[in-house]
Image (cartoon, rainbow, N blue to C red):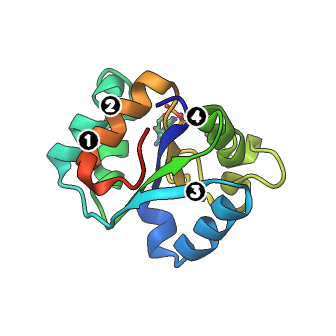
């Protein structure tokens, strides 16, 4: 699964009508979309997804935000997908994100920052399984 990552177009970007532009950017950068859905996470689902950040001061704000409106999880395929998508995504804080990154162009602030991307192959597998059944994913990995 080293060619797969889990991306989420976060509620701020979906609500702002930027999902199409972000998907276009993803495709233009050479990713293939292997699965997608739109989901309004419950608070509990957002808490489970971000459980690793449970002790962080922004956990409450983050899980409130992620369960505030619909989001779009995507399974993306590309060689070196995790690292490649993190490059395209840009720094957590859009003020620090490089030109040409999704967060530079679409994120509001450090919390409402348009997209999520897995940070390791191991987490990519877990995060893909959080949102998708194997039968929802096109192709064999
Ligand atoms: P990422 O890998 O760049 O998404 O960053 P992290 O794994 O460090 O944090 C996960 C998510 O938590 C970020 O994408 C933000 O949505 C949120 N987050 C991180 N730091 C802050 C912060 O200082 N304040 C708030 N409100 N949210 C934050």
- In the orientation shown, which residue stands out farthest toward the right? 99
Quarter of the image containing the C terminus? top left
- In the orientation shown, which residue stands out farthest toward the bottom? 17
Nearer the N terminus, badge 2 or badge 4?
4
Check disc 4 and report the residue beneath it: 82
Between 8 and 47, which is closer to the camera in this rendering?
8
Measuring 53% from the left and 52% from the top, which residue is drawn there? 115
Question: Residue 126 shows which numbered tag?
Answer: 2
Would residue 74 be found to the left or right of residue 95 on screen?
Answer: left
> Which-is-in-front pick, marks 2 and 3?
3
SS label for mark 2: helix
State the CA–CA distance, disc 3 to disc 1.
Answer: 20 Å
Between 141 and 78, which is closer to the camera in this rendering?
141
Measuring 73% from the left and 54% from the top, which residue is drawn there? 104
SS label for mark 3: strand
Answer yes or no: disc 1 within 8 Å of ligand 1. Answer: no
> Which-is-in-front pick, marks 3 and 1?
3
State the CA–CA distance, disc 4 to disc 1.
Answer: 16 Å
Question: Residue 32 shows which numbered tag?
Answer: 3
Answer yes or no: disc 3 within 8 Å of ligand 1. Answer: no
Tell me where residue 92 sits by quadrant: top right
State the CA–CA distance, disc 1 to disc 2.
Answer: 6 Å
Check disc 1 and report the residue beneath it: 130
- In the orientation shown, which residue stands out farthest toward the front? 140
State the CA–CA distance, disc 2 to disc 3.
Answer: 19 Å
Nearer the N terminus, badge 3 or badge 1?
3
Q: Residues within 10 Å of mark 4 (few under 14, many from 20)?
A: many
Measuring 15% from the left and 44% from the top, which residue is drawn there? 44
Tag 2 near tag 4, CB within 8 Å: no
Tag 1 near tag 2, CB within 8 Å: yes
């Amino acid at each position: 699964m080293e060619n797969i990552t889990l991306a989420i177009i976060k509620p701020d970007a979906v609500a702002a009508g930027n999902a199409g532009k972000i998907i276009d950017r993803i495709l233009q950068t050479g990713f293939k979309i292997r699965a997608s859905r739109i989901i309004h996470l419950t608070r509990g689902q957002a808490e489970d997804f971000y459980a690793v950040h449970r002790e962080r001061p922004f956990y409450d704000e983050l899980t409130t935000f992620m369960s505030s409106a619909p989001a779009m999880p995507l399974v993306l395929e590309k060689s070196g997908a995790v690292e490649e998508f993190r490059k395209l995504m840009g720094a957590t804080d859009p003020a620090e994100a490089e030109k040409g990154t999704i967060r530079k162009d679409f994120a509001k602030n450090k919390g409402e920052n348009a997209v999520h991307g897995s940070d390791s192959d191991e987490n990519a597998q877990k995060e893909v399984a959080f949102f998708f059944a194997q039968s929802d994913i096109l192709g064999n990995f």
